Image: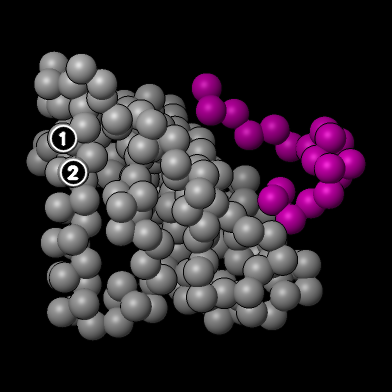
Amino acid sequence: MENGFYAIVYRMRYINRWALMRGTNEENLAEHSLDVAMIAHALCLIGNKRYGRHLDADLAAVIGLYHDAAEIITGDMPTPVKYGSRRMHDAYEEIEGEAVEQLLSLLPGDLKDDYRQIFEGDNAEDGRYLRRLVKAADKISAYIKCEEEENSGNSEFRTAKESTRKSLDAMVKELPEVRDFVRDCLPAYGRTLDELRQPGTEETSLS
């Protein structure tokens, strides 16, 4: 029997983000998901190495890869619309939940429970904290995109950058892993390739 889950997830590359924005470079869902996965993985490693946590960094990366997979079915919902009102947000969450169920239904039966954990998680303390870090990684990725557009001379993303930075600053206060990443890693995203290839004056270790 054929299973369509992986074939439909492949189509993340056809879903463009920032649908209401005029961008200099389009960003698709697959690209964004890879960014989120890498950042979420790093945040968990920082938490484990520096703050004595016991987070599954590999799981965080996989959750990051699939965190927006429901949008293959729902399409990209612009943030101002999604969070425009409590009623709108609740309605979208219900639609998103149904989309996840549709995706899970495309899996072989013996794999569904494993993927349900990826999409829904558990209520254990470490699991909840891990998902907060994935959400923070999502926000960091969005901020990087906004800054990239602004640095390219596109003022279209100015307001989005300001609101995203405000949300990110709140996370910095609550999540030390996010604070460290924003302080130590985020500035480098604005540098040129030649600048990035130069050794830094200080080395930050995760060991």
Residue 43 visible, this angle: no
Q: Is residue 127 above or below residue 59?
A: below
Q: Is residue 61 above or below residue 195?
A: above
Which region is colored magenta? 188-207
Numbered circle sitting on residue 28: none
Pointer 1: residues within 10 angstroms few (<14), some, or many (20+)? Answer: some
Name the outermost residue toward the right: 194
Cα–Cα gap, marks 1 and 2:
5 Å
Q: How far across and down, in percent of the image, does residue 56 sit?
A: 31, 26
Q: Which residue is mark 2?
A: 102
Pointer 2: residues within 10 angstroms few (<14), some, or many (20+)? Answer: some
Considering depth in this image, is 186 or 91 the residue closer to the camera?
91
Residue at point 65%, 69% (across, down)? 23
Q: Are marks 1 and 2 in contact (CB under 8 Å)?
A: yes
The image's colour scheme reads one colour
Q: Is residue 168 above or below residue 10?
A: below
Q: Quadrant of the N terminus?
A: top left
As helix, strand or loop, the secondary structure at mark 2 comes to helix
Query: Quarter-wise, where is residue 74 in the image?
Result: bottom left
Determine if the magenta segment contains residue 204: yes
Q: Which residue type does callout 2 highlight? A: Gln
Left or right of residue 38, residue 4 in this image:
left
Name the outermost residue toward the front: 1
Left or right of residue 75, residue 181 in this image:
right
Left or right of residue 136, residue 186 in this image:
right
Q: How far across and down, in percent of the image, does residue 66 sit?
A: 35, 39
Residue 58 visible, this angle: yes
Q: Which residue is mark 1?
A: 105
Magenta stretch mostly in which secondary structure? loop
